[in-house]
Amino acid sequence: MGAINLGDKFAKFSDHWSPKIIAQLNRLHIKAVKLKGEFVWHTHADTDEMFLVHSGVLTIRFRDRDEIVRAGELYVVPRGVEHMTYAAEECELLLIEPAGTVNTGDAGGDKTALNETWI
Amino acid sequence: MGAINLGDKFAKFSDHWSPKIIAQLNRLHIKAVKLKGEFVWHTHADTDEMFLVHSGVLTIRFRDRDEIVRAGELYVVPRGVEHMTYAAEECELLLIEPAGTVNTGDAGGDKTALNETWI
């Protein structure tokens, strides 16, 4: 298997809020996802979650503040901390988290991504 | 803690083959490292190792082939697979691997990075 080109992976899909698995590191999945608009407030009780922005601007809302993450920046949301992602314009990012992590955490709802697939 | 800007982190050091920890995700460390020249053949028996190239060109040599990883590309070396990194010109990359992973794996020697520090 050769190198995985992030631009090539992001070119393969256009839907929002639907993470695609592009690599595995031990028990973690590396996922490519495109965001636009507002997600749901949720918490991952058992895992930290890493966001690495590839293009655009990501806002991670916490109950007490917003954090801005731009292309070439990363942010780790600690386990147990409620958060919500938001992007005014389309934002492409990598998510790194344990395989099986559900995007909506404890919240559920219609933005829950079922059957995440490899691309 | 705000977003972690990769360019800012790489601007903080200039030594080669000396990974600096920039973030933690569960039991993993995210490390920034600059390479130039040839590393040593080694194996990590217990963990995969992920390389995400930030600038330059990384060659990962295996016993049967070379893999080329450019800026914006990633590569996961599976556990137990002997490899050696090489960069003709300086290459900046992120390493993602469990905290405590030794850069030279089973090989040891004078390129072993002791006391990896946070920047």
Image (cartoon, coloured by chain):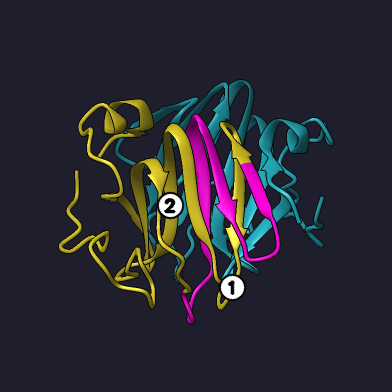
Chain colours: A yellow, B cyan
- Which mark, residue A81? 1
Q: Main secondary structure of the magenta part?
A: strand
Q: Say which quarter of the image contains residue B8.
A: top right
Q: Is residue B113 left or right of residue A18?
A: right
User: Relative to A8, is A26 above or below?
Assistant: below
Percent x, y of residue B77:
40, 50
Give me the residue at 51% from left, 50% from top: A51
What amino acid type should be assigned to the residue bearing mark 1? Val
What amino acid type should be assigned to the residue bearing mark 2? Leu
Q: Do the residues indicated by labels 1 and 2 lie within the same chain of the protein?
A: yes
User: Relative to B19, is A82 above or below?
Assistant: below
The residue wearing badge 2 is A95
Determine if residue B84 is in view: no
Stretch of the chain drawn in magenta:
A44-68
User: Relative to B32, is A27 above or below?
Assistant: below
Percent x, y of residue B80:
39, 63
Residue A63 falls within the magenta-colored stretch: yes
Q: Secondary structure at mark 2?
A: strand
Q: Say which quarter of the image contains residue B64.
A: top left
Determine if residue B83 is in view: yes
Residue A113 falls within the magenta-colored stretch: no
Q: CA distance from mark 1 to mark 2?
A: 16 Å
